Image (spheres, rainbow, N blue to C red):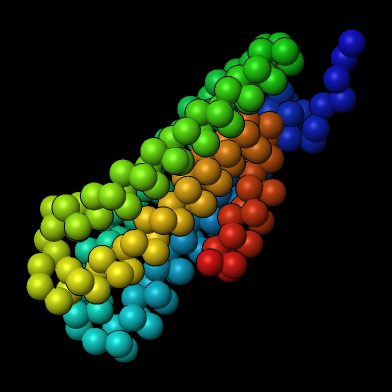
């Protein structure tokens, strides 16, 4: 029984040059919004004081590490699921998608646990000291406790991308950033 294909799957199975053009723009816009979000956040925190800005500076590398874990999982999910879609093996694509969700939940819980428990040590590894370390702990704990909501979407966006749906990925990411 043939499954109805989404617009994104049809795009992926079509002309590769056209697919790259249509898939790249939403991804580039998402990256621009991420950068703009971080710049605006830094300007706002700078108004609070030098120690507070330093605290954010200590947490940012760890934030990027958490984001990269989710993004890396998402890249793997995109690769595996899209290959099965390309082979027209819907059963294996569904199986890979289900296992991707389970792996993402497990990774999200582990990341949240590790970063929350070892927050002070991790912040000291990136240079946190004195009062700035205390501010970084306060800011970092909030972010680290919520890291499950960073890893999971970044990883699960891979499922949307695997079907060639980068626009919805961009919209969902933008909505998540506005709500945090």
Quarter of the figure that contains the N terminus: top right
Q: Is residue 86 left or right of 155 when viewed as pictured?
A: right
Residue 137 in the image: state x and y as whole percent: 26, 66
**Quick check: 83 above or below 132?**
above
Task: Please name whichever residue, 100 or 93, is drawn nearer the observer in this view of the structure.
Answer: 100
Can the viewer see residue 87?
A: yes
Q: Which residue appears at 64% of the width and 44% of the height?
A: 166
Q: Is residue 163 left or right of 36 when viewed as pictured?
A: right
**Quick check: 154 above or below 80?**
below
**Residue 141 figure quarter:** bottom left
Residue 143 in the image: state x and y as whole percent: 39, 61
Task: Please name whichever residue, 106 or 81, is drawn nearer the observer in this view of the structure.
Answer: 106
Residue 15 in the image: state x and y as whole percent: 69, 27
Q: Which residue appears at 19% of the width and 57% of the height?
A: 120
Task: Please name whichever residue, 81 or 105, is drawn nearer the observer in this view of the structure.
Answer: 105
Count the marks: 0
Q: Which residue appears at 33% of the width and 69% of the height?
A: 139
Can the viewer see residue 17?
A: no
Q: Which residue appears at 85% of the width and 20% of the height?
A: 3
**Quick check: 25 above or below 162?**
below
**Quick check: 50 above or below 57?**
below
Residue 135 in the image: state x and y as whole percent: 24, 74
């Amino acid at each position: 029984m043939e499954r109805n294909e989404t617009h994104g799957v049809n795009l992926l199975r079509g002309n590769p040059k056209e697919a790259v053009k249509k898939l790249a723009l939403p991804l580039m816009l998402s990256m621009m919004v991420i950068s703009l979000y971080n710049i605006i956040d830094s300007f706002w925190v700078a108004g609070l004081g030098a120690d507070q800005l330093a605290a954010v500076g200590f947490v940012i590398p760890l934030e990027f590490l958490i984001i990269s874990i989710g993004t890396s999982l998402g890249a793997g999910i995109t690769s595996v699921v899209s290959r099965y879609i390309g082979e027209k093996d819907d059963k294996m694509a569904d199986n890979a998608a289900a296992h991707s969700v389970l792996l993402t939940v497990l990774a999200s819980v582990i990341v949240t646990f590790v970063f929350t428990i070892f927050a002070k040590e991790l912040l000291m590894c990136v240079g946190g000291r004195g009062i700035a370390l205390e501010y970084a702990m306060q800011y970092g704990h909030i972010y680290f406790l919520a890291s499950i909501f960073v890893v999971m979407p970044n990883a699960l966006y891979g499922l949307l991308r695997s079907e060639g749906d980068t626009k919805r990925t961009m919209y969902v990411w933008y909505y998540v950033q506005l709500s945090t």
